[in-house]
Structures are given as structure tokens and as C-alpha cells.
Image (cartoon, helix red, strand yellow):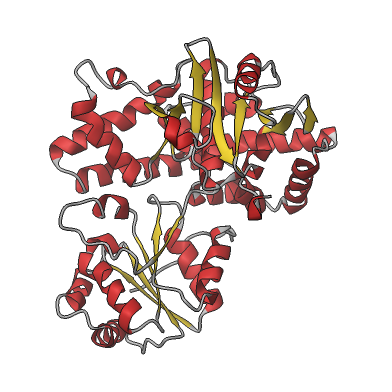
Amino acid sequence: MLFVLRYTVYMERLIEKDLIAWKNNPAKMPLVLFGARQVGKTHTVLAFGKSNYKDVAAFNFESSKNLRAVFEGDLNPNRIISALSNNALKEIKPDTLIFFDEIQACPKALTSLKYFTEQAPEYNIIAAGSLLGVAVNREGFSFPVGKVNRLTMYSMNFEEFLAALGERPLLEAIKESFATDTPLAENVHFHALTLYHIYLVTGGMPRAVAEYVAKKDYDYVRMVQREILADYYADMTKYASPSESEKIRAVYESLPAQLARENRKFQYSLIGSHARAVTHEIGLRWLKDVGLIYQCFKAKEGKIPLKSYSDLSYKVYFNDVGLLGCSADTPPVPILSGALGGEAKGAMTENYIEQQLVFNGLNLFYWESAGVAEVDFVLQLNDAVVPIEAKSSDNTKAKSLKLFVDKYGIAKSVRISSKNFGFENGIKSVPLYAAFCIKESRGGK
């Protein structure tokens, strides 16, 4: 099976460090890589394999139906390796990276990973699939629990975006200022905000970023994003029943309207006059399983553990801020100039921040008090509750944040806005472009 590395621009992905750690782990098992379509799984695994192994044997179960016949017999690893070697027209050895792409199209191939763990652990196998999240929740689909390692890949965060643009000195300056609460020089701060606004348009889908880096033309960026959305809609039709597909699409198409309100809490009534949780929850669950949306649940209390105080109310965000802008038909010019107003600007800001925090593996919540106050995000970081106020501009009045801090005795809070770095009155000021820096400290320190 021939694979082509499609991007003309090399884009380093942070998950490569996790892949190297997996490779070097003597107790590793086959790795299953989750992630939405078009986030870069295939490209990243192939690039990783070519850089770290003597050879790569890649197999795509979605495009090669004949390949599935290899797994119709017994699942003995030695027999499978022999058959795969014949299919690839080359000998597959333990120092070869075996890549099973779109593995959800062949359930028995996924089951076989259990036997590789038990009987042939010397082989290096990575399996990936854009619809794996849906497949593993399907009746009759057996997932090798406890016999595989797992990772999830997301679209590029702002750190990866800066690296793709060759902005590594800026990237290091941002990280240093975040760690020390030291403001950047004003010209550097302004430049970083400019790149932030560009990212709001491009988002982090690798093809869209590569198109921007190569051409600096937003028409081409939007063209790529429309193609990605078309692929998503095609999946809704191909991998769901007609009645389910209709509900999935209705939920997804309602998201720009859901977010373009002062209260961004998800409401089924905005899908249609007859939409209810009992009828359309399947659509929401499908979108979440394939990684097209993120949910942020309401925390009734700002206490540890936040999960114990989770409410049934939630907000729903796109998996990529660029796709939000494209789906909502938001022109690039007002986004780039900062002139986008109203709730549309706030929606993009929140979606962007959510995207950066989810990338860092954080569970997100929000908090509100009887409709009087609302804190956009609440995190549990290093055994402490950390509230985050998100501002799309430099208007940093934070009455809701103060109310939350006073109510729960919070020692430290975060305000994300267009203002420079700083720390005052227990509030850490984080510029919008540095949201990617907010993460769990290693070792809990």
C-alpha cells in the first residue's frame, strides 16, 4: 500500500515525543492512536516511522478490502506477519514499524493486537482510525482492553502552529514570560497577538496550516476547511444509519448558533422545534466519539474533585476553531483585524481556549451562580481548583472571577485576554496567545 506524505511544509507534532517514549518502553504493547479525521495521524505516524525505524510497513483497511482477508483465519501473529509480508512485498521484521491505518474497518485486525501482546511482543505496531471512537462503542465490536497502549491526537495547537511558521524564538519567549509573569516587549506582544488572530482563521488542521504557510492566502485555507467539513459530513452518512445521520448532522450544524449566544450552554431546542435529548442525544454522542466536538460541563461547586460536582448542563465546542469560523461563514478579514464583534468574537475566543486546554489533556468545567455570574473555565490543576476568565479583548474587569475566588477561597486564578503577562492580586494575566502554556506541572509541582 503506497502512502504519500502530503504536506510540502514539515510540521513537527508534539505527540512525536510520546511516540518516541512508546518506542523506547521495553514493556510497550501495540499502540492505538485515536483522533478525528484530518488531524494528521497518518502523516505523523509515517514520519515517525521513517525517522525511527529501519523500515515501515503501512496498511490501510479502508482502501484495501483484500487486506481484510488476512485476518479472516486464525489470529496467530506468525501467520499474520507472513501474510502481511506477502501483501507488502517485503519481509516484515521486529525492527519494522507496522502501521494499521483505519483499523476500525477490520475489527479482527484490532482483536489481533491482543495476540501480538501475548505471543509476539517483539513487533512494533501502531493502529489508528478516524472512526475508532464510534466503532469501539458499537455492539459486537471487541476492543483489546488492557492489551494495548492508547494515545489521542488532536489538531495542531498554537505552539505547533508557531513552530510551523518558524517562530521558535517567539515560542521560547512566550514560555519564559508565562513561567515568570514577565511582560513581553510591546512589539513582540503585538506580533504574537497578530499570529493569534491568524490562527483563529487557519485553526490547527494540518492541511489548512500547510496551505497558509505555503501561500499566505486565506481563500485556499477556507477551501481546505470546507473540504474537511465535507469529509466529516460524508462520514456521518457512511458510518451511521439514515435516521442517525440526520440527527448527527442537525446537531453539528446547530453548533455555530449554540455558541453565538451570551449563554453558550447547549440547548436541543436550537436544533429544531421538535428536537429533544431523547431523540438527538445519539447525534451528540456520535460527534463526541469521533472527536469532532468537545464538551465542557458545569461544575455546581468550585471544590475538589470537580467531577463530583459536575452538572448535566454543558457547552459544546468545535474540535478546531478554524472549522468553527468556516462553518459559521465568518469572513477572515474581521477576525484578522480584531473587528469581529458581539458574541461571535467571544465564541471564537472560548473555542480557541478550549482547544488549547483539551490538547493538554485537561478536563474542563465552567461555573455559574444563579445566572448572576459565570466563570468560563474551571480546572483542577496540581490538586487545586483554578478558575479561568476568558476575555476576547483587553477588557479585564472580572467580577465573576472575584465572586468565585471569594466564595471558594481560591489562592490563584487566571485571566486570559489580549493584555500582556503579569500577576496582580492573585490573578495571573495570560495573553490569548499563551493559553497553550496552561497545563498540569510535571511531578505535580
Q: How many marks?
A: 0
Image quadrant in which the N terminus is located: bottom left
Q: Say which residue appears at 50% left-offset and 79% top-offset.
A: 26
Residue 248 in sight here = no
Q: Tell me residue 39's x, y (percent).
A: 45, 52
Q: Residue furthest right?
A: 185
Looking at the image, residue 243 sits to the left or right of residue 217; the answer is: left
Q: Say which residue appears at 67% left-offset and 30% top-offset.
A: 413
Residue 70 in sight here = yes
In the picture shown, does residue 263 fall above or below 417? above
Q: Tell me residue 435's x, y (percent).
A: 63, 38
In the picture shown, does residue 214 fall above or below 392? below
Q: Nearer the viewer, residue 428 or 74?
A: 428
Q: Tell me residue 51's x, y (percent).
A: 56, 75
Q: Tell me residue 258's x, y (percent).
A: 39, 22
Looking at the image, residue 157 sits to the left or right of residue 194; the answer is: left
In the picture shown, does residue 257 fall above or below 53? above
Q: Nearer the viewer, residue 308 or 365?
A: 308
Q: Quadrant of residue 269?
A: top left
Q: Say which residue appears at 58% left-offset and 20% top-offset.
A: 340
